[in-house]
Amino acid sequence: MATTNPSCPLLLLLLVSLAVVSVVDSFAAPKSYNFNLKSIARPMTSSNNIELPSQETLDSLLSVAITASKQAGEIILGNAGGADVLKSKANSRDLLTLIDPLCEKTIRDTVLATFPTHAFLGEEDVPPGKEASAAAIEAKLKQLNDADDNDNYLWIVDPIDGTSNFVHGMPLCMPSVAVAYKGEVVVGVIHDPHRMETFTAVRGRGAQMNGESISVGEQSDIGDAIVAMGSPPAEESMKMSLAALPVLMPKVRTIRMIGSAALMLAWVANGRLTAYWEYDLSSWDVAAGSILIEEAGGSMTDLNDERWNLRTRKICGSNGGKVHKQILEALGEANLV
């Protein structure tokens, strides 16, 4: 990797982080909406040629995912002023509150009440660190390989995505709930309780926000792109993020760090952001957002432009096409690929 002046990327990182302040109050909470559980039906196979569950089953999965997400969202709102840190996990930047496991239990109980035989993977079930995270999803996928079709479902849940935001009372944190069937994500829900915006996607039916169809942005060149990225707690990922800034920032319109992977992925899906990339994320950070972006017409890949799957850790989600390619090329220039 080429060496750079360390003060330059650190200054850029500070400037990008400060830009978050203008984001928090940018979107007013809408009125309630009805969700269209039976949107336009498309072919009943996924892009991996996996036969999808029936429309009735998909409807039921989506309904339970929305209910569970909103129940967790109510808990988050009830503690919106901030929460005490129970402990740090991988390091002092990787936090756990008393509310995280409560939200996860709420989601789990709601899911298993309807689907008692389904597998469940929540962030709070797994020890910290990327090795433990990778091992956890691998174990679940292996378990599902031995299951019959009726039990080949895995719920993948981050009970509070954006815990550091939550701890400090920033309204940029929310549950992320996805359902995979035979290893393919078929349902995703990201419910933002602070703005009452519920992003949903069902494989083959498109993506919605509060029941209305959404699509990715129309930017056709990287110079017009608003690109999001993370401020990761792990040292390796932090170094990679800093290395990307001096290369990527001059090429794009602006960069944003919002502190919630779920929210950044959802905002790519509805066009508020053009793209979001990250050097290392776990399956529960990305699963729901990945289907939102794909069903909204975007691209969801690793940094080598291979389609995202549950084992992928280096991610880029965007409006697709030329912009996606240009962002990956810029990350390659920074020696991240």
Image: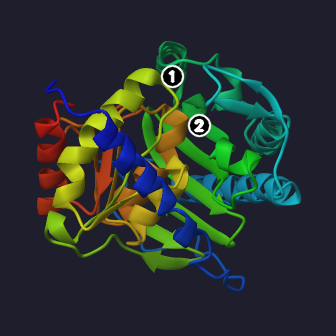
Could you say which disc has been placed on residue 137 in the image?
1
In space, the residues marked 2 and 1 are separated at their CA atoms by: 9 Å
Mark 2 secondary-structure assignment: strand
Mark 2 Cα-neighbour bin, 10 Å: few <14, some 14–19, many ≥20: many
Note whether 199 is above or below 123 in the view shown.
below
First in residue order: circle 2 vs circle 1: 1
The quadrant in which residue 161 appears is: top right
Mark 1 Cα-neighbour bin, 10 Å: few <14, some 14–19, many ≥20: many
Could you say which disc has been placed on residue 156 in the image?
2
Relative side of 122 to 9, left or right: right
Q: Quadrant of the C terminus?
A: top left
Mark 1 secondary-structure assignment: helix
Q: Quadrant of the N terminus?
A: top left
* x, y percent for residue 83: 83, 45
Is the residue under label 1 in contact with that under label 2 (CB below 8 Å)? Answer: yes
Query: In the image shown, does 54 or 17 lie closer to the viewer?
Result: 17
How has the structure been colored for display? rainbow
* x, y percent for residue 207: 45, 67
